Amino acid sequence: MLKKVVYLFFLITGGTLGYLYVPDIVNFLDFTDMKWVASPFLGTALGAIILFLISFWLVDYIVGFLKWIEEALIKIPVGDLFFGSLGLIIGLVIAYLINIPLQDINIKFVSQVVPLFITILLGYFGFQVGFRRRDEFVNLLNVSRKERDKKRMVTEADSAETATPKAKILDTSVIIDGRIADICQTSFLEGTVVIPQFVLGELQHIADSSDVLKRNRGRRGLDVLNRIQKELPVKVEIYEGDFEEIQEVDSKLIKLAKVINGVVVTNDFNLNKVCDLQGVRVLNINDLANAVKPVVLPGEELVVQVIKDGKEQNQGIAYLDDGTMIVVEEGRNYIGKTIEVLITSVLQTSAGRMIFAKPKLLEKAL
């Protein structure tokens, strides 16, 4: 079908060119004995036949090019195509308005060449702006729609905004860590869980690594995502968009959080700080883990097993079930034993909590 359309195009084009130019060519060459050739109808037939014959050599190349364009357009998401086309139209309209006064200038270069250059340039820029900044335009439309809703029904809109939890955007580190699945299972994490496509790509890259440790971490992350999506009572969405002008995955996460007004979930200390600096809400799994650690106060008693000796003389080291380290003064003689200890002080640092204690037997002896 496409070949027939191309043949028809060449036939009509050839006939039109023959009708317009063959009589002028005959008159220019001054074929006095062949005036009948200058007939417009004969020129139409001659032009149509010539271009139709030429089309036999060009049709396969043209059809192949058209199919390539068709496949490329089909692969582009509808949203990207729509906003790209909208940007192209706006760019062409602006170029047309700019070119109107230029056409009145008598300088041939300015009146003919410059308008063509401006049209191509603004058309290109318009398409690129619409295509690459689609997410921001969508968010802008959503914001405008929300503002209109607020004007119609302020109280109801405000209450709905308060009741709707924000989307939680998972980064690569928190997925590999695995604890996010347990948190989702307890229903402490409200709202939609968003997994960006570029995070999935990074996980896939890690899972395909030649390094065994990295490969195992990547596969663990993919298993965690599979569990969250199929087994846990949370709504999971895959964000298909990408920010091609941004290279770093962490920067893309921050950009996405701003676009959809979401919350970044991570256990990356550096990403946490950058989010704070840019005004993006962030949930740090490590902060949550520190917050739910068992609270112990000076003067309380614990039963612990002294595992090894400490850095200082006669110190022993024990651990709580959550991994919190307990430094037992004069505990070196109790290594391998389970004893009662008395908490003397608690030190909280950014690296975690450290507890200092001494054996209760020594307290009784005093």
Image (spheres, rainbow, N blue to C red):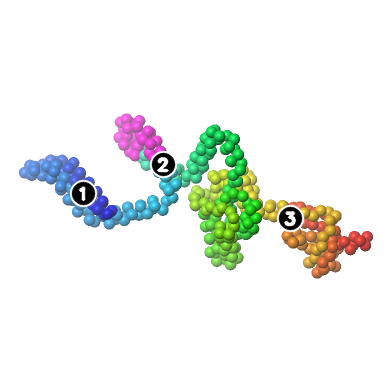
Disc 3/disc 1 C-alpha distance (Å): 82 Å
Q: Answer left or right for 26 relative to 95.
A: left
Foreground pick, 111 / 134:
134
Amino acid carrying label 1: it is Leu
Q: Return the residue at label 2.
A: 86
Disc 2/disc 3 C-alpha distance (Å): 54 Å
Q: Return the residue at label 3.
A: 293
Disc 1/disc 2 C-alpha distance (Å): 33 Å
Amino acid carrying label 3: it is Lys
> For mark 1, does the 10 Å Cα neighbourhood hold few (<14), some (14 to 19), or many (20 or more) residues?
many
**288, above or below 24, in the image:** below
> Upstream in the sequence, badge 3 or badge 1?
1
Element assignment for label 1: helix
Residue at 66 percent of width and 54 percent of height:
285
**Residue numbers of the magenta segment:** 87-116
Q: Which mark is residue 11?
A: 1
